Image: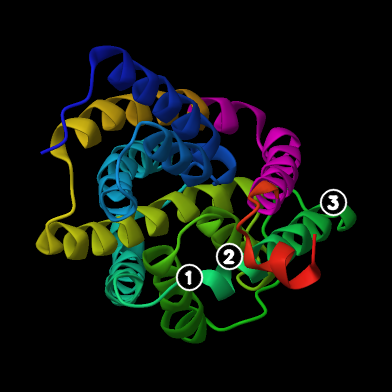
Amino acid sequence: MIDLALHVLLFLFFAAFIAGFIDSIAGGGGMITIPAMLIAGIPPLETLGTNKLQALFGSGSATVAYAGAGHVELKRQLPLACLSAIGAAFGAALATIIPADTMRAVLPILLVGIALYFALKPNIGDVDKHRRLSEAAFAFTIIPMIGFYDGVFGPGTGSFFMLAFVSLAGFGVLKATAHTKLLNFGSNVGAFAFFLAYGVVLWKVGIVMGIGQLLGAQAGSRFAMKNGAKIIKPLLIVTSLGLAVRLMADPTNPLRIWLGW
């Protein structure tokens, strides 16, 4: 049983609010909440499990906001969210038995690549483009793969969903953001279900942070819908680069060790 002081819970609440705001627009909230929980003294596995609980509030709240504004059809997209959840559940199972060193090493490179893609492709906006992958192929390969990644590790999942929707499904940036939150909600559900069964979820911490996530996600999603691609695209670039820098700043990152930095 972990009993945290009130000031620590307040710290986690505000960290979750900021994470919810950023995550509802460009993803990357986990790179705020996970370090915050570790700083608060929560063990790593409990941090992963509790992070999925509080993330449900943020991704769910953002999904409802985007759906309410007509940017995503929930009934039509629910099967995709289920595929994301299944992938995440398998990923979470793997997370309990293998180290994530390889992904920690590769992720900064992938995030820089995503940032460069959105920075250098000038015609990305809110208008849908040509689909490069069929709906079935996209649903049964890309979605569960990203969901799996979210379960086994997590940071940058929103950026990967955004890249997939824009580059492969031909979605405009705002539509991609809306659908990203739904599928991120699905992957959070799948991973949370496994971690709950594994017994590593701290309910008090998760609910306090979840309220912060919900409020932040509502503010962020409204901000994104008001400003569209002109704010989503730059924030996605900054967030991806920020995640890459944050990962590389960790002296234990395997890539730094392999490069001798």
The disc, 3 or 1, on the residue closer to the chain's N-terminal end is 1
Q: CA distance from mark 3 to mark 1?
A: 29 Å
User: What residue is pinned by disc 2?
Assistant: 104
| Residue nearest the observer in this picture, 209 or 100 | 100
Q: Tell me: residue 200, above or below residue 39.
A: below
Asked whether disc 2 touches disc 1, contact meaning CB atoms under 8 Å apart, the reply is yes
Residue 233, located in which quarter of the rendered image? Answer: top right
Q: Amino acid at mark 1?
A: Ala
At numbered mark 2, what does the secondary structure look like: helix, strand or loop?
Answer: helix
In the picture, measured across the screen, residue 261 lies left or right of residue 94, that is right
Judge by depth and name the residue closer to the eye, 199 or 217: 199
The reply, left or right, for residue 101 in relation to residue 247 is left
Q: Amino acid at mark 2?
A: Arg
**Where is the C terminus found, in terms of image quarters?**
bottom right
Mark 3, secondary structure of its residue: helix
SS type, badge 1: loop
Tell me where the magenta segment starts and ends, as one range: 222-248
The residue closer to the viewer here, 258 or 10, is 258
* Viewer-side label of 2, 3: 2
Quadrant in which residue 184 is drawn: bottom left
- The mark found on residue 100 in the picture is 1
**CB within 8 Å, label 3 to label 1:** no
Amino acid type at circle 3 is: Ala
Predominant SS of the magenta segment: helix
Quadrant housing residue 69: top left
